[in-house]
Image (spheres, coloured by chain):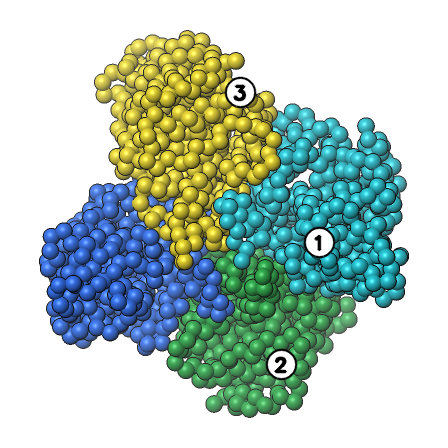
Chain colours: A green, B cyan, C yellow, D blue
């Protein structure tokens, strides 16, 4: 049993710090894969049947942490557009960071288990999940996959604990869906041998303002090929690196987002990923992150269903009937529950294939796109159940709606994934 | 020519106070009903052809005020959830308040012209339009329609100037879609003859925290019938009236919303509307407000189209093509432009009928529902064009999306209007 | 008053031949523009208010003819895939053919009145409307607009009576959405001066198997420019013209459709339209036909609403409640009635503009696309109300659904019109 | 290895009778669960990975039979509205009937394998699948589950061979979604002891005109409880049983449908199912049939995708580009492929649970509803790709569209399943 698991099996460890929740939802029945004799609206197609005991235990621990530790602070954090970096330390302690990596203090769980963790976090908030995904999939992931032994040993253990925070610099102000046109450049240092100078700007970078280490994708001046660099903030001379926060976001306000400006920032060659070249590097990381989003957004959708159901059962109109009794309300719940159940099964299937090395990027495109689209669509429809009350942020569903719109646009906007799929189906590309 | 019109014809009056806009849109071609020989994407089905010279002039003045005076402050106001009551004074000065009322310092314009004013305001922000609608349709409206001569003379001229602010208290915490079940009660004052004591709570009341006069709908204890009262804040003894603001809204953040708590608040009989009884009173006001929403939301949608189009023309991806060249983007624009054009024509038609006394409430239900639904739907789809950048509030479209969701739920949630229409079509009611 | 009108005013003329209908709908209240005090589900936004007395009378006569003469035979005609050419004679007698043309035995009614006629016919069946549209808009139209005086006098009077039947040959097997690439060629006759030889194939040509005169668009060999020819079947030497019917259609089975094969078919220069060159010719005709479709499909949709409403009121399930009482059913009816009302207003508006020479092709694209899309979508949704019974052709709605799908694809498939609109909105073309 | 399997392993057995197909699709890669390294548009989420070797073999044999034997005749059968009862004999020979039953000459395959058989058949035509489903799930199913040993031995072996044809009489003219209100009655025979007299009418009964044995659900006069009877046509006195065919259907024209009229039809008590009472009996059968539909419709959808893709690759417009290169076309294909992949995974999951006795009826409601809805929706959207050519029945997609609409309405109309799910989610019923 992994080290993580042993912790998962003493969940009381967290109990001392439980904050009482004013608007807590009925606790989910996290575990139990026992024979299904009754329909369970929280898991309509019994996806739990597909999980191992270990995966169920991991899911339960992650859910418990998230409901007990994250949920109580998200309302205020979202209002204030504030991200507490301690959350990453807590996640590290709970074993949630880089969880699918084996070694370096990481838990070494299955791909599906990794997805269950993102689902637990995103059930609370997509912003919290984003902060974790960046750390796990977009920074620890490429270091583990592409890094040298030195790089791994230097960064992974601290990152697993949440003591070192990472961010992922790919997107540029003028190049979103088309990273191959990036302008950030790495040129050999004219004076200092074995060093590159990095210049360029990245934007919409989760965690950038608080990151200790920044994965920067830049074109090598000599070759025009894209390479990955680990920029260690503490080694950057003053004026060569700045990471201003972007404020007043419409969504993901419980995460922190910023830009990265590099101006002749010197980076030793030892900090470059040794072999990976071109878009294969960043796309491989994105693939993992997208997988996490696919299962993660199902958590957000499930939370919307639970909230809408509770509201519909409690809200009475017209002769004291709970509005849950109305056909138009029931159809919204039925549609959402169906899409959540289908999306969960698809994500588990792709997770199993990914774990066996059989998943293609198009499969990830398919589930990332569909699950984000459906989570967003249904969250919006469920929001209608709240009527005028939906405008109050205390019901939580407006926050999910705003967040899920962002998940639909990042890491491959929905239409772009359509065209990736369209290319795979027809053999013809339609991007231009 | 009305007094309003004469002002409309010297638009330079406002020029001194124009704030330069950093993110101003190309000025709309407000007026001109000249022969259409070219397709105009801002008015695809030439609705201008249906307007009188006077209506075109009113529209132009309103648009100019809104673009020059309101647009520059909305971003910050929305961020800060702040509503400046001076806006009502400015609107009063410009002649926008109670504009369809004839006399009492009001402009006496046509129903359609009144709708063009709401469209101009909502092109900037649905919250600003809400504040104005409450003043015009929900307070000045019933005073004019149901009030005594004394009530009219006491309130309308000040309200037309925006010096007296009103609010409309119908919705209660437990009775949204079903106001007939309201619990607010008016009972004869046990000591003071000719007075009622009002008790009860209202919620989601636009303008309540800043209102000078509150239209309160309450059941008469003796009869159980709903009656309307003008509660004058300055006459309320301490502790009998409170109007706390509701903060942290998901939308309409540039408007101010609150509750109303009445605790044995004494109101003279002279402040009761003399004849109107039952839901006819509030529903008549809502009818006018809903008409304003139907045309107003078309303004918000048109602004989304303009913003998305501009973005799509400026944003380049994949070999330097503007994304406006992509089929998937063009379809979104075409769909939205179509719904805006159709919704505008429908609203003008109903406005004409309303002006002639031929509009039924179901017609208003139809256009309120459809135009809110379509504005919201298309705004969301257009938001996708902005990709990851949509998360920045500076592009304005996220604000419209959040606002339009609220317009869909208030003054008759979309599904409720479906059932009103369903009843009218089938003769059978399906509310319970 | 036009000659047509005088006939419209003695509707009893048709009475003798009225077939009793087993499944007739409650007669529509065709006329009456009296004050609207009650919501009329058949005309929810009182579009009748926008019509002249003359237009109302024309509409009434056309509706009467269609309900009394066409409705009784459509079920069998559709089953047998049979089109009775006598229908065109009857339509001619009733004054419905080429109705907007002034002179040559045509009625000279307004553009909107022309649309009301198509609506009346399509309320019965889109196939019947197609047969009429081809005669009126696609053959009489270009002869009137582009023809020489001789051509007009030779063909229009007989066509107005339905004694001469026409068809319109533009689409080719390999060139549907892109007629500019047509392959049909006209080359100077090598022996016979003043003659062309036409060769090529056209497909999906309504009326071709029964047409007396065929408008053929072909490229002039010398110039490569598209020109229009009137091919008179009786003048074609054996073997130079064939017009086989296409059978086993999925929709429009009450119309007749075929191919046109021309093999060195000699046509005198006098039969060429003298001036029009390029796609302007065919597109101008299509513009008129598309206008007719835009209002016509609203008739089919209205018929679906009427049929679904009747069914829902009569069908009882679960404790004897008519299913019209269910929220999910009412929403379908409300949505459909709304789209029908909106589409009708938009079509009337564009008709007015067209009558004044102010309509642009993009306006027609907009209403053709939207009205076909919405008619189809709502017809499909309404069909669900019939449950398993929908599979029976006697309820008529399946026929409308099948027909409306075809209207969505012909005379500009929906997506193509999106791109026409997208080009007009953005200034960029996205066809390739 | 089952007897069925041994046959599956000598597929050449069928080869002699292969009809050459003019419009055959590229043969699907039926088998092979080898490592997925490339995206397979025919199985985007590698559902094959979830199947056993045996299931893959069964699927392959079934697909082969259907493509080689059924596909060549469906076009004409659909045109003529003709069902050849020999098809059931062929299916019996191939081992497809009652395949999940163990013993009595049936193959005894897994629930999922049973679904793969329906998928193979429905890939050709939903009507053929309907005929088979009735035989297998609705007649053999209840005989096996509820019948006496004598009943099983008398009917199952002949039915497995397709020599005895069955039908299922539940739905009545006035009771579709609400079978509990049925009016068909069984009363004790006044003269003949041990016999019942059955009277009543059933409608929309697949196979009824050709059925040898009819499962009739009727209320026992004495108890008012619903019981099931096996009505053997050859034992019915003249005039007591008639089963007229219903013609002129809008869909499922390759299946045969009829009514059942019973007039004091004598049935021995030995032909009653001994224990099952109430709606549990018919609902249990429907549950199995619905499972087959859920996976079956995915076959129809996959065939639509394959046909649309082929068409889009072959059809060239605008400068010779295949229309498969257009974004609007690719999006349609991507959406459809996604829904097919998701629906397949969900159906396999529920099949596994059902095989283990863990599936609840609500799970079946969920996948029946969603898969029918999505198959229909996507088939319609894909049909648009064919433009005007879609009207020709030779492209096959119009037939699928018409069929799939029927599958959405039978065995629980989509809205009814919504309300079943809504009840399961909320605990409140909204049927009345």
Label 2: few (<14), some (14–19) or many (≥20) C-alpha neighbours in 10 Å: some
Label 1: few (<14), some (14–19) or many (≥20) C-alpha neighbours in 10 Å: many
Please name the residue shown 45% across and 41% down the image. C305
| Residue on which the image places disc 2 | A68
- The local secondary structure at tag 3 comes to helix
Q: Who is closer to the viewer here, C367 or B270? A: B270
Of badges 3 and 1, nearer the viewer stands 1
| Residue on which the image places disc 3 | C54
Q: Do labels 3 and 2 share a chain?
A: no
- The local secondary structure at tag 1 comes to strand
Please name the residue shown 55% across and 83% down the image. A61
- The local secondary structure at tag 2 comes to helix
Q: Are marks 3 and 1 on the same chain?
A: no
The reply to whether residue A26 is in sight is yes
Q: Who is closer to the viewer here, B398 or A224? A: B398
Q: Who is closer to the viewer here, D65 or D148? A: D148
């Amino acid at each position: 049993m992994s080290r993580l698991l042993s912790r998962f099996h003493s969940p009381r460890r967290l109990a001392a710090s439980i904050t009482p929740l004013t608007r807590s939802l009925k606790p989910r029945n996290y575990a139990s894969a026992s024979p299904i004799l009754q329909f369970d609206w929280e898991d309509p197609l019994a996806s739990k049947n597909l999980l191992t005991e270990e995966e169920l235990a991991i899911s339960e621990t992650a859910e418990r942490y998230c409901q007990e530790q994250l949920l109580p602070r998200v309302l205020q954090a979202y209002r204030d557009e504030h991200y507490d970096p301690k959350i990453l330390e807590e996640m590290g302690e709970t074993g949630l960071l880089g969880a699918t990596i084996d070694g370096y203090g990481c838990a070494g769980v299955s791909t599906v288990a990794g997805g269950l963790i993102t689902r637990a976090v995103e059930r609370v908030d997509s912003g919290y999940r984003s902060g974790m995904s960046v750390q796990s999939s977009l920074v620890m992931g490429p270091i583990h996959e592409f890094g040298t032994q030195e790089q791994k040993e230097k960064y992974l253990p601290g990152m697993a604990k949440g003591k070192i925070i990472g961010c992922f610099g790919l997107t540029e102000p003028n190049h979103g869906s088309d990273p191959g046109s990036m302008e950030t450049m790495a040129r050999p240092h004219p004076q200092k041998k074995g060093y590159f100078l990095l210049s360029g700007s990245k934007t919409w970078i989760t965690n950038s303002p608080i990151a200790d280490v920044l994965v920067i994708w830049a074109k090598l001046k000599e070759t025009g090929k894209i390479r990955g660099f680990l920029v260690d903030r503490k080694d950057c001379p003053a004026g060569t690196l700045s990471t201003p926060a972007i404020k007043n976001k419409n969504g993901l306000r419980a995460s922190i987002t910023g830009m990265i400006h590099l101006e002749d920032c010197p980076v030793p060659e030892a900090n470059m990923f040794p072999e990976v070249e071109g878009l294969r590097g960043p796309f491989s990381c994105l693939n993992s992150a997208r997988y996490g989003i696919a299962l993660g957004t199902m958590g957000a959708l499930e939370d919307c269903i639970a909230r809408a159901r509770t509201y519909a059962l409690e809200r009475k109109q017209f002769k004291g009937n709970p509005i849950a009794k109305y056909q138009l309300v029931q159809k919204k719940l039925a549609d959402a529950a169906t899409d959540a159940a289908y999306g969960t099964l698809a994500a588990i299937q792709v997770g199993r294939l990914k774990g066996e090395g059989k998943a293609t990027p198009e499969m990830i495109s398919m589930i990332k796109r569909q699950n984000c689209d459906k989570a967003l669509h249904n969250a919006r429809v469920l929001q209608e159940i709240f009527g005028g009350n939906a405008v109050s942020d205390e019901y939580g569903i407006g926050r999910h709606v705003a967040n899920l719109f962002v998940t639909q646009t990042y890491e491959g906007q929905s239409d772009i994934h359509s065209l990736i799929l369209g290319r795979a189906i027809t053999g013809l590309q339609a991007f231009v």
